Image: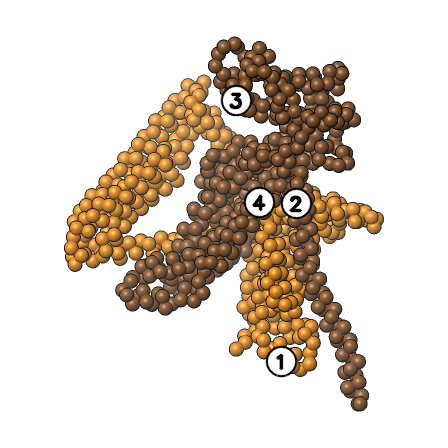
Chain colours: A brown, B orange
């Protein structure tokens, strides 16, 4: 055996070791991504769970007209019901439950257990059942304060509940006057300062209107632009310039589009601030490049033989494009459009610029109402110090991720089932 | 003015014009026509719709301005003598009163409102009349004999082509809009604050005085701390994203089995699909406390809004970006190069390091530049997890602020639009736009210029 092969043999071991190390490094890199994804999702799901249930307290409330302060033998209307002192009724019922609490401070702690929004819920429930009025006293499950909610959900029972309150709550729990139910309010209420009363309905509606504007603008314009660039545009400077522009716009930071929206749509054209109209316009400009690029790819994949056959039968250029190329590339275009919409749904920064960050309780009814959208709602709530808002934020994130997952699944389905390979 | 009603009227005219023209054309023998009957319908509908829509647009753009100017001119002297901003406020106030039907005490203002109201009504009526005239003339055209003598299809297709071209021109309009809006506001800002002070000043505290006698609110706009903060956070992000992204791309394309690849690539893409606000929430509420506790347990004083936490999370966000871009270029390296290297006795990792990476380097560098541009422009993660106070430091454990954070904080408060504070946001936006544009152009050039061409 000569010296050289000995050197090679010895170096071989080192080289194989290096090879193994490199492989492990690669595998580590892939797993880092996975681990992080798992950590992120797990953390958010974990934080979100409390928000899906809410705690309620059962109280017995009188329903006779005298104690509601309603005049005898007259019709009931919403105006009269909103004048009833519901809060007073709730407090009185609480006092009757715990007659031993006489000091002002003690009573104050007692009152704090029920959510300050409970009176409005109670009013609406009675308004839906006017036949209750004048009848016997009824038992009502009323929303508890968010601190009670946290106390009830946490095993350790450490929260911002005083010892006296905790005693009261334990009595209530023994009497079966405390329960945990699915938090429907999360999906039916608008925003609120009280975490137990806050919901994402307003943000959902805002996202809907905003995306509607975006879709109605980007889809036709995006398709038209892609068709022009692929099928009609002559190869010249102007066309090149358009292409450079589209590619650059795709990489411009989203916040810059927000600045554009603020300066042009709001300050120059005087459109209303915080409106889904402006949000939709800004998001449309932002997603347009994405949609044009993917639509062009879809249009390009239509084989020339089809076009030539149509030309051969005497179709004009416009007829070839609109009767054959466009229908055949539609699944691909829609796939791109859905992905673009998913991008727009998750976008936050440009909407902050045009004032969609306001605290809005009402549910927007159209594209001119003040509104906020899901991601902005997440941003707004994540700032709130209450623990319950963290859960709400995480729950909203889950809803948002759910929508994104559905949209992406739809895109994959479209691609798998309708896209033709030629 | 009733915009939906006007639009509806235009639509009705379109449909009527289409039906009229279509029926006329259909009753003619085919041999006498140059196009299919429906093209006559389209042509008539376009005649009915386009001019009216154009008119509506012009009207919407001009009418409020003219009316405002007239209202202002009719207002008493003491209001007109005020600054432009104050005038705007007064006008808004008066218009709110008009909408709600309240009355102004001042008879002079009351008179101006009266004129305003009358003219607004007249303008609305005039528009309606014009739309009707246009509509009926289109209907007349649709039922005239001149229509059938035209080459309808060519006319329709010409208009369609123009519309398609205009749509693709929107990309240019957007770019021009961005440049103009950002540039104009920035120029106004640089009139108040010299460009040199902005670019090289070391102190950033945009709190300007609301009252002249307020203390400690000189308002200094030196943007260097912001640039340094942005670069610090982006550098941390790239330090995470580039090695991890590149290594996963290499592993997935060179080592992994097909099954693992088919599973792992979409999983990594999920990371790219998660909205940035979710990353921001995660960074602020989970990663930042984690980093802080970790630091404290080894005796380091870590800020709760440390650059490290924001940078790490941002890095994870751009991992899929780097990995998919590098994946593309690695796959573009021809198989023959790999085979040649392996045949000479190199191990797979030696092949990767000495053959594939050098061959793919321009593409990888381009991808890293694009990732850097993404990191610099990223907003939500830093808004939620990085600090607000501008501090000139490169210590990743301290809180720094970035350009995007400052844009958001300057523009989300209640501000007068013309204060240097809001204008500063546009100047920062200009810097951001120019930087990312340069990075993107550079990335494209690197890829184009140094790409190896294989047969």
Q: How far separated are the C-alphas under marks 1 and 3?
A: 83 Å
Q: Is residue A241 left or right of residue A59?
A: left
For disc 1, the chain is B
| Residue farthest along the right direction in this orientation | B299
User: Do discs 4 and 2 belong to a common subunit?
Assistant: yes
User: Do discs 1 and 3 belong to a common subunit?
Assistant: no
For disc 4, the chain is A
Q: Residues within 10 Å of mark 2 (few under 14, many from 20)?
A: some
The residue identified by callout 1 is B340
Q: Earlier in the sequence, mark 4 or mark 3?
A: 3
Q: How far separated are the C-alphas under marks 2 and 3?
A: 37 Å
The residue identified by callout 4 is A400
Q: Nearer the viewer, mark 4 or mark 3?
A: 3
For disc 2, the chain is A
The numbered mark at residue A129 is 3
Q: Residue A149 location in percent, x, y?
A: 69, 32
Q: Earlier in the sequence, mark 2 or mark 3?
A: 2
Q: Earlier in the sequence, mark 4 or mark 2?
A: 2
Which residue is pictured at 67% across the width and 57% down the height?
A33
């Amino acid at each position: 055996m000569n010296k050289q092969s000995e050197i090679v043999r010895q170096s071989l071991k080192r080289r194989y070791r290096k090879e193994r190390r490199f492989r492990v490094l690669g595998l580590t890199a892939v797993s880092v991504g996975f681990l992080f994804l798992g950590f992120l999702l797990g953390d958010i799901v974990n934080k979100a769970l409390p928000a899906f249930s809410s705690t309620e307290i059962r109280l017995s409330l009188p329903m006779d007209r005298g104690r509601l302060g309603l005049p005898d033998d007259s019709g009931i209307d919403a105006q009269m019901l909103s004048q009833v002192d519901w809060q007073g009724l709730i407090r009185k019922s609480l006092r009757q439950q715990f007659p031993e609490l006489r000091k002002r401070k003690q009573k104050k702690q007692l009152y704090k257990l029920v959510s300050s929004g409970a009176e409005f819920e109670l009013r609406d429930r009675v308004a839906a059942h006017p036949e209750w009025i004048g009848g016997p006293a009824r038992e009502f499950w009323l929303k508890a304060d968010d601190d009670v909610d946290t106390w009830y959900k946490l095993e350790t029972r450490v929260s911002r509940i005083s010892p006296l309150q905790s005693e009261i709550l334990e009595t209530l729990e023994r009497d079966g006057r405390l329960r945990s139910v699915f938090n429907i309010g999360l999906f039916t209420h608008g925003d609120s300062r009280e975490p137990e009363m806050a919901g994402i309905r307003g943000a959902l509606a805002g996202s809907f209107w905003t995306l509607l504007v975006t879709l109605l603008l980007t889809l036709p314009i995006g398709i038209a632009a892609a068709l022009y660039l692929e099928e009609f545009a002559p190869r010249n400077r102007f066309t090149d310039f358009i292409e450079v522009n589209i590619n650059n716009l795709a990489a411009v930071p989203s916040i810059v589009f927000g600045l554009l929206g603020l300066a042009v749509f709001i300050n120059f054209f005087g459109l209303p601030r915080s409106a889904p109209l402006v949000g939709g316009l800004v998001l449309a400009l932002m997603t347009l490049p994405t949609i044009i690029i993917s639509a062009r790819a879809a249009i390009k994949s239509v084989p020339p033989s089809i076009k030539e056959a149509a030309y051969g039968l005497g179709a004009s250029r416009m007829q070839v494009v609109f009767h054959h190329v466009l229908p055949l590339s539609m699944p691909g275009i829609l796939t791109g459009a859905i992905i673009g919409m998913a991008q727009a749904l998750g976008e936050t920064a440009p909407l902050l610029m045009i004032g969609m960050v306001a605290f809005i309780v009402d549910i927007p009814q159209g594209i001119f109402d003040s509104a906020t959208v899901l991601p902005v709602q997440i941003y707004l709530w994540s700032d709130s110090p209450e623990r319950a808002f963290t859960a709400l934020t995480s729950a909203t994130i889950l809803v948002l991720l759910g929508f994104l997952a559905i949209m992406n699944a739809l895109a994959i389905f479209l691609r798998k089932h309708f896209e033709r390979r030629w | 003015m009733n915009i939906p009603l006007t639009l509806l009227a235009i639509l009705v005219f379109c449909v009527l014009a289409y039906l009229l023209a279509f029926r006329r054309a259909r009753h003619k023998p085919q041999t006498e026509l140059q196009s299919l009957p429906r093209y006559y319908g389209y042509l008539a509908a376009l005649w009915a719709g386009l001019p009216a829509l154009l008119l509506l647009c012009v009207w919407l753009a001009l009418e409020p301005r003219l009316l405002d100017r007239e209202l202002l001119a009719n207002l008493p002297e003491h209001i007109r003598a005020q600054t432009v901003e104050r005038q705007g406020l007064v006008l808004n106030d008066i218009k709110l009163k008009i909408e709600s039907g309240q009355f102004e005490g001042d008879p002079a203002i009351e008179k101006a409102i009266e004129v305003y109201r009358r003219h607004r009504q007249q303008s609305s009526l005039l528009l309606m009349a014009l739309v009707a005239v246009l509509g009926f003339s289109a209907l007349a055209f649709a039922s005239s004999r001149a229509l059938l003598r035209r080459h309808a299809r060519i006319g329709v297709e010409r208009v369609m082509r123009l519309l398609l071209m205009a749509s693709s021109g929107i990309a240019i309009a957007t770019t021009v809009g961005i440049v103009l809006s950002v540039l104009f506001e920035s120029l106004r800002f640089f009139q108040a604050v010299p460009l040199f002070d902005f670019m090289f000043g070391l102190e950033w505290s945009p709190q300007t005085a609301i009252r002249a006698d307020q203390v400690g609110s000189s308002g200094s706009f030196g943007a260097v701390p912001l640039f340094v903060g942005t670069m610090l956070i982006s550098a941390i992000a790239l330090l995470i994203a580039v090695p991890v992204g590149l290594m996963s791309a290499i592993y997935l394309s060179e080592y992994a089995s097909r099954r693992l690849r088919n599973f792992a690539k979409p999983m990594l893409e999920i990371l790219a699909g998660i909205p940035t606000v979710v990353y921001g929430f995660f960074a602020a509420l989970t990663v930042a406390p984690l980093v802080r506790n970790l630091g404290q347990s080894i005796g380091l004083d870590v800020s709760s809004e440390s650059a490290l936490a924001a940078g790490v999370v941002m890095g994870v966000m751009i991992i899929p970006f780097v990995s998919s871009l590098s994946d593309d270029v690695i796959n573009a390296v021809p198989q023959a190069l790999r085979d040649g290297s392996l045949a000479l006795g190199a191990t797979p990792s030696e092949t990767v390091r000495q053959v594939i990476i050098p061959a793919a380097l321009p593409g990888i560098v381009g991808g890293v530049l694009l990732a850097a541009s993404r990191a610099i422009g990223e907003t939500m993660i830093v808004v939620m997890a990085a600090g607000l106070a501008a501090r000139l430091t490169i210590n990743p454990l301290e809180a720094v602020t970035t350009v995007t954070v400052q844009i958001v904080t300057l523009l989300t408060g209640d501000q007068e639009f013309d204060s240097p504070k809001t204008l500063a946001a546009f100047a920062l936006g200009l810097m951001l736009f120019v930087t990312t544009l340069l990075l993107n152009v550079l990335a494209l050039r690197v890829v184009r210029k140094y790409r190896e061409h294989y047969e």
